[in-house]
Amino acid sequence: MKKIYTGIRGTCDFTPSKSHSFNKITQTARQIFKVFGYEEVILPLLEEEDLFKRGVGETTEIVERQMFKIQGKSIVLRPEGTAQVVRYYLENSLYKQSDFHKFSYIGAMFRGERPQKGRLRQFHHIGAEAIGSDSFYLDGEIIALSMKILEGIGIQEKQLLINSLGCLEDKEKFSQKIKKILNSKKDKLCPDCQRRLERNPLRVLDCKRQECRGVVTSLNLGKESLCSNCKSRFENLLFTLDNLKIKYTQTPYLVRGLDYYTNVVFEIISGSLGSQDALGAGGRYNNLVRDLGGPDIPGIGFSLGIERILLALKTSQEEKKIKVFIITASETLLGAGFKILQRLREQNLACDMDYCGKSLKGQLRYACKRGAKYVVILGEEEWKEQCVMLKDMEKSVQEKVKIEDLAALLKKYMIL
Ligand code: HAM
């Protein structure tokens, strides 16, 4: 027996119905990006490994364990879009053309994770990055934009978690404080977190394991590690969100798994997703442009995971795509039926016919299965008169129609 190949674990094939939902989601996102003034960039799937080491952080999960590296080269499949957009921005010296830029992107990302529901090795991001302003109004815009896209897509049930890490100094102070407190509870942490505590203490707050979550939530963290400037900045943002009528939950242990964040970080979660509950996430990265060799320019952005959105949408109901199905009473009429099919398609009517030699009954059954609203039946008698029988499948009524009038009539019925 010849081997039947299966897809790589952690990747997924998009069925026609899933592809349809994928396209609807991306269309909605593109429309909303336009309204908010974000311009789309399409960037490569391959990038230099070092970009993410410096951008995302050497001791992050993504860089330490999850990057897909091209054998023998220092090239990786991109694990995320933010460092990449900043690379594009710096490579083209865009800050010389204008002091403020807003980008959007939609595309595949790759992370070598242990696959499970909602956690894949190849997945898709809808993302936005705004580079050149430190305004808390822009923070508000970015959060409003991410929520608006999810709303536009039809995600009702979602919760916005928000926190501020403060500036670099605040973050360092917070990190040392966490290290000190958690050192006394080290034996209660998972082996990974015991190691993280030495190299990157904030990562412990991000651990999803039950035992670590328990320790972290018992810490009763507050906003006390923020300097007065960062504190009032965060309060201004929360006030802006109140004015935008965006509900949020302040979550002091939300730190995010990427090192570039400073000040606001946020995550949008959905209870319907199980343990991988984040539909999307983002935050400010005021040092990333500088860390990647550019001038001191702040930025903020977010990414939404399309596969998680699809899970949350419960895309079970099949879209009825074929509106009209052509049925021929005999094989000799196939050519005539094929001509009618082309005529209707020229008029942009979604239609199809059978190519497998099914009986009349078989064709009717197949038309039902495809969800056809109308069937066009071509018999010998009708063909002689240059007519067809047009049947409305929902109302179960039929009428004889001249072939030359068919397209116009179908269009009229579909508008009604
Ligand atoms: P992230 O949290 O790593 O952030 O990813 C954003 C979203 O992508 C997650 O909330 C989740 O919905 C989805 N996602 C992540 N990993 C996977 C996976 N393995 N399988 C399926 N979906 C996944 C970032 O990547 C940042 N670049 C976000 C950002 C943009 N921050 C500022 N600008």
Image (cartoon, grey):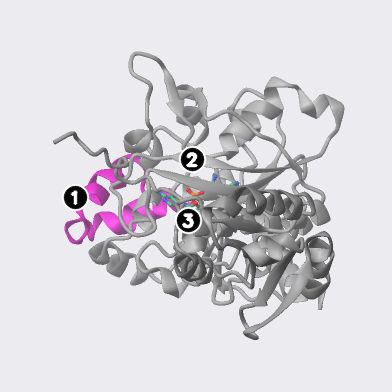
Q: Is mark 2 within 8 Å of ligand 1?
A: yes
Bounds of the magenta segment: 174-201
Q: Quadrant of the N terminus?
A: top left
- Which of 61/59 is in front? 61
**Res. 307 mark:** 3
What residue do we see at 59% from left, 32% from top?
84
* Residue 292: quadrant of the picture: top right
Tag in front: 2 or 1:
2
**Res. 191 mark:** 1
The kind of secondary structure the magenta stretch mainly shows is helix
Check contact, mark 3 vs mark 2: CB within 8 A. no
Horizontal side, residue 293 vs residue 369: left or right = right
Q: Earlier in the sequence, mark 2 or mark 1?
A: 2
Q: Residues within 10 Å of mark 2 (few under 14, many from 20)?
A: some
Secondary structure under the numbered disc 3 in the rendered image: helix
Q: Residues within 10 Å of mark 1 (few under 14, many from 20)?
A: few
Q: Which residue is mark 2?
A: 109
Tag in front: 3 or 2:
3
What residue do we see at 67% from left, 66% from top?
381
